[in-house]
Image (cartoon, rainbow, N blue to C red):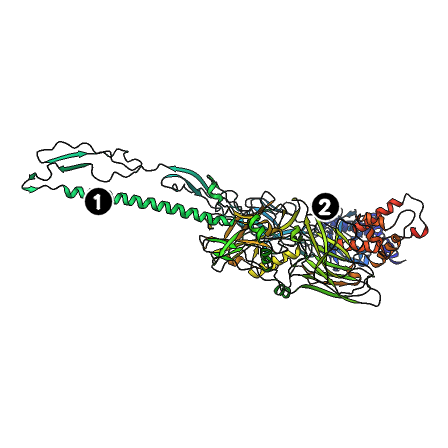
Amino acid sequence: MGSTGKRRRSSLGIFVVLALCATCASSRGPVGDGLADSLSSIGGTLPHFLQEPEDAYIIKNNPIKLRCRATPALQIFFKCNGEWVHQNQHTSQEYMEQNTGLKIREVMINVTRQQVEDFHGPEDYWCLCVAWSHLGTSKSRKATVRIAYLRKNFEQDPQGEEVPIKGMIVLHCRPPEGVPMAEVEWLKNEELVSSLRDDNIDTRADHNLIINEARLSDSANYTCLASNIVAKRRSATATVVVFVNGGWSLWTEWSPCSVNCGRGFQKRSRTCTNPAPLNGGAFCEGMSVQKIACSVVCPVDGVWEEWSEWTICKAQCERQRWRECNAPPPRHRGKMCEGEGESTENCTGGLCTQNGKLMHDVKPQSMDNSIDVALYSGLGAGVIAVVVLIVAIALYRKSQSEYGVDVIDPSALAGGFQSFNFKTTRQGTPFLLNSSMQPDITLGQTYSSPICFQDSIDKELFDPLPDKVKDQSSFMVSLGVSDRAEYHVKSHQENLTAGLHPNYSTVEGKKMSMIPNGPHTLGKPQLKTSAVFGHLGGRLVIPNAGVSLLVPHGAISEDTSWEMYMLINQGESRAQSEERCEILLGPEITYGPPGLNLSYPVAMTIAHCAEVSAENWNIKLKRQTKDDKWEEVMSVDDESTSCYCLMDSHNCHLLLDQPGCYALVGEPITDAAIKRLRIAVFGSMEASSVDYNLRVHCVDDTPHAFQGVVTAEISKGGQLLEEPKTLFFKGNCLSLQVSIQDIPQFLWNIKPFTTCQEFSFTQVWYSNQQPVHCAFSLQRHSAATSQLSCKISVRQVKGHEQILQVYTSVAESEKETVPFFMQADCTVTSETGAKAFKIPLSIRQRICTTFDTANAKGKDWQLLAQKLHIQRNLSYFTKQQSPSAVILSLWEARHQDSGDLDSLASALEEIGKIHCKSLPQSPDEKKLDFNF
């Protein structure tokens, strides 16, 4: 029976009560009349609800109460979800209202969370009241009962924005799902926006916050706050930055003409202060200084005309003559003629007396003669001084021509306008955000392989760049001479002097050839890594050098282990032959130990700096013999069975059987052979806090070579001022020029004839990982100057050019030296076993089993090599015990930096498609499935 029986008994009881009421109402006897009178006193209306049940929410596990009040009412019952609530679950009371004297009946029930959860209907859980009187029944409204909740995560968090001043800001917020629906409020720096009473902020539109016109005061942290009767939730904080782009002030008045006579210039200036950039806003674009040509009429000094004829001798024994200052007359502020315009002399030889005195005119005549002598002596001295000055200038220019540099400050040729451009900070350049966030030397995207430094290695392997050589007549920093550079000077003195015109700088009276010097010097310890390998193989890596060694699985026999090593030779290189113009394209690598016996060749990867082209380069692999001589192993374009060489755009992959020292050497065939150079500019403030040094480095485009530059700059506290760029340097015997341009001359000063420096072709072409570098020393006019903007041009004569745009803050408080290319795995130098390989061992073995054995359908290792883009020197693989295993080792070496097996999987899938149209496969072949 259960609850159904109880409901039926309750309903039966309700109907019995109603039937009795109807019987009493219809009786004619005295009792019936009395009851009728009683009912009539209640009123002749249907029950009227004074309180109906209201919608309710169950919070957590707390039950809710539903109430009904009605008059006149003999009985009130609840009905939930179409079924009567048991009478025992009702709480009922009846009382008399004092004002009206009416009897009011009130009924209440409890609804629990369990009841709501157990209900599974097409609509929400609902209840209503039914009230009875002698005239009939009345029903109340339906009240729904729902379980209240509020989820934790916002459907949409507000996102931070950077907007210009007076721009519109819209922060979107979609609160978490909840019952009842959450109400949204906004916090500005943890203060309710609604309490600010700001008409500029509107929070009414679909939970969004809208700022109609952004002001500087609107820069803040905004949080979306969602709440209902259950809980409150906070969104992620959105940071709003209102920035101000810089604006130019009005131009100043034109300055006076720079000369007092002839052609000069006038200038006017303006500042980026109307308004000044704020909160990362862009600096003004355009010119801060403007120049125009002007001319000033030169003054013309007056010159005396010839004297007139003497007058006749007068009674006073005198005669006179005159002259005018009209040949020419003074004009345009010119000087008046010096001397007298009238002359008087005694005309009787002094024999005539006047007033009893003898007139002598001899003395004035002698004074005139002495004046003429002094005048001609002064003119002669002036002519001599001019001649001496001209000779001195000619000698100075002749001495300067030894530098091979013909430099004129470009601003002197402008004639009209001087450009002064600031780089905007709103171009998305991560390391040039604003003046307070200067670019440090942390550009991880420069090289694909990890480049980072360990202090113990830096101090042992690299010296700082050589101290600059100062010349009192120039700010130019001369280059020192390394041990390797001295070797080039001795062996190629005639070529440098006769054909290539190297630059020279004078230091203490000695003439020194400006051969590039860098951080790599003789006698330095070697970069070395080692590990113990067994049958499973592994990998050796020299961090930051672009060099690695892969020992394949099975190369070392079982139950045997070898301690293998790999190192970079940093001494003098004799692998290259300068008679053939050969150059070293990458570091010299040695691996061992000697006597190592391997079943499969190792795969060595070396980064190189050549633009690979068979028409322009003859690239060779050389090996050092026991008597320290170098022998050619193979040319990369030739067929060889002793070793294999695969050239990629930036790396060379070698398959080697014998341990030893190897070097990759390039011989240019044509003038179009290109060697890649890495160009970088660093800056640091001198101890004087007035001078600022810019250092430009041109180094072979390999990680190992660039590592030396960075190590030296870290020791100097240098800051990387622009992302390094690649310069294509051709082997056409033309020199390299480095110049500085667009220096704001009203803020910074650099001495004349130091704005350009030149390096001979030999210095650059035979750099051998030694960076060619130069420096420019700038001096600011005022200690308040905190910004530097200029351009560095690096170009080969009649060749490729790269522009490095420098915009930096030179304030000492804003400098912070940060290590270059920091990565988490920079200390990993070796891996052994399966973790060193991308291809799982089981997959590798199945591939080798499938392709090592040739079959009628041609599915062999040659097809595998073709699909993996290995199409030359296939005779090398024929001699191998397992050609497929060696091909996979080469694939591992080429893809060590990529994180997946997509290319290999695609090749195998393509092979499968080729053979799907052939004869049906055997059951064994059908079972092959390479899953990655």
- Asked if the residue under mark 1 is in contact with the one under mark 2, i.e. CB atoms within 8 Å, the reply is no
Q: Which mark, by number, is residue 476? A: none
Q: SS of the residue at dot 2? A: loop
Residue 220 in the image: x percent, y percent? 57, 53
In the depicted structure, whether residue 410 falls above or below residue 180: above
Query: 522 and 792: which one is in front?
Result: 522
- What residue is shown with label 2? 614
Query: 207 and 697: which one is in front?
Result: 697
Q: SS of the residue at dot 1? A: helix
Residue 848 in the image: x percent, y percent? 86, 55
Residue 929 in the image: x percent, y percent? 88, 52
Residue type at tag 2:
Ala
Question: Callout 2: 10 Å neighbours few (<14), some, many (20+)?
Answer: few
Q: Is residue 288 left or right of residue 797?
A: left
Residue at mark 2 to residue at mark 1: CA–CA distance: 87 Å
In the depicted structure, whether residue 637 falls above or below residue 590: above
The N terminus, quarter of image = bottom right
- What residue is shown with label 1? 370
